[in-house]
Every structure is written in C-alpha cells, then in structure tokens.
Image (tube, helix red, strand yellow):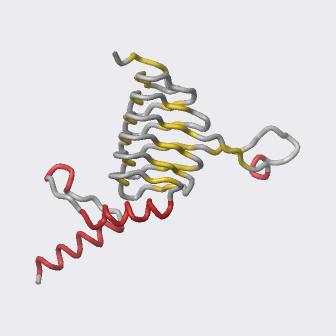
Amino acid sequence: MRKLKKVIGYIVYTFVGGVLPHYGLGVEWRLSKLIRIFSAKLLFDECGKNIDIGRRAKLSSRISIGDNSGVGDNCYLQGKIIIGNNVMMAPNVAIIATNHKFDRTDIPMNQQGDEEKCVIIRDDVWIGYGACILPGVEVGKGSIIAARAVVTKNVPDFSIVGGIPGKIIKRRQ
C-alpha cells in the first residue's frame, strides 16, 4: 500500500510540475508524457510524430511542430511559431512572436495593441538552456543557439550563435 501511495504521489507530482528523477536514473514517466503529447495534438495548428513536450511548458495554440522535435521543461512559446523536424529545445527557452506596439506617443503603450511576427525554427536546430528568440526571427537549418543567447536577427544555416544580442560565433562544417 505504501508503495502504491508513493507511485500515485509521483504521478500527481508530475502533473503539478515537481522535480522528477527520470533524467539521471533512466526512469520514463510515460503517462504524463502521453497526456502532454495528446494535449499538444489538440492545441497546436500542426503536430508531427514522436514529439516531446516538457513539463510546465507554456504554449500558444498557434504552433506548428515537426517530427521528432521537443519543447523543454518550463519553455514559453508565444504567438505564431513554426518548428521544423528534429529540433531540440532545452529547458527555459522563450520564443516570442508578438510584441507591444509603441509607435505613437499620444496614447499609452499598453493601449496600442500588439503586433505579431512569425518565428521560424528550421530542421535540425539545437536551442540551448534559457535562450530567447524574438519576433520575426528565422533560425536556419542545422544551427545551434547557445545557452542564454538572445536572438534578435535571422540566423543563417549551420551557424552557432551566442551572446546578448546573439552573434555568430562559428559556422558548422
């Protein structure tokens, strides 16, 4: 009975968003993963095969995600976002496709509305921990975005980008 309570506790903890030991111990929490995948298929514009949605991710309904791609734990995806195939996204990544308008000075910025610029992440991209990708950016095929990078401009194919603001550090050969 005690073991059953512990298993149920872990399952409930998963849904609430607690820390699970599966990363280092090879334990897979299939039920919670299946529920997140099922929810994504209902929520997203398009949803590929074999996707992975991390715990506590905050997601827009205007997302398209390709085959074998994943969204890490605690990620924040806002607005129209297209994610290609085989994209890896670490925890705490923010992809923001909307921004406040601020052109007019005669009315407060919070009353000027929003504008949306689609973010496109091409195939075979790795986005590191805590990276932030801003509106209108296109990340090219085979690129790597370093941890904590803030990407404000398009990234060419097979580039490694890091820093604030993000700059090309190296090209993948």
Return the x and y of residue 172 as percentages of the image width and height. Answer: 36, 18
Given the current orientation, which residue lies at the most extreme right position?
106
In the rendered image, which quarter contains the C terminus?
A: top left
Return the x and y of residue 78 as percentages of the image width and height. Answer: 56, 50
139 over 18 or under it: above or below = above
Kindly identify the residue that appears in the image at 39 percent across and 64 percent down: 38
How many discs mark residues in the rendered view? 0
Kindly identify the residue that appears in the image at 37 percent across and 34 percent down: 126
64 vs 164, nearest the viewer: 64
146 vs 28, nearest the viewer: 28
Return the x and y of residue 134 as percentages of the image width and height. Answer: 57, 37
115 vs 64, nearest the viewer: 64
59 over 154 or under it: above or below = below
- Quarter of the image for residue 13 reads bottom left
In the rendered image, which quarter contains the N terminus?
A: bottom left
- Quarter of the image for residue 39 reads bottom left
51 vs 160, nearest the viewer: 51
Given the current orientation, which residue lies at the most extreme bottom position?
1
- Quarter of the image for residue 124 reads top left
Return the x and y of residue 35 as percentages of the image width and height. Answer: 35, 66
Kindly identify the residue that appears in the image at 42 percent across and 30 percent down: 145
Kindly identify the residue that appears in the image at 44 percent across and 60 percent down: 40
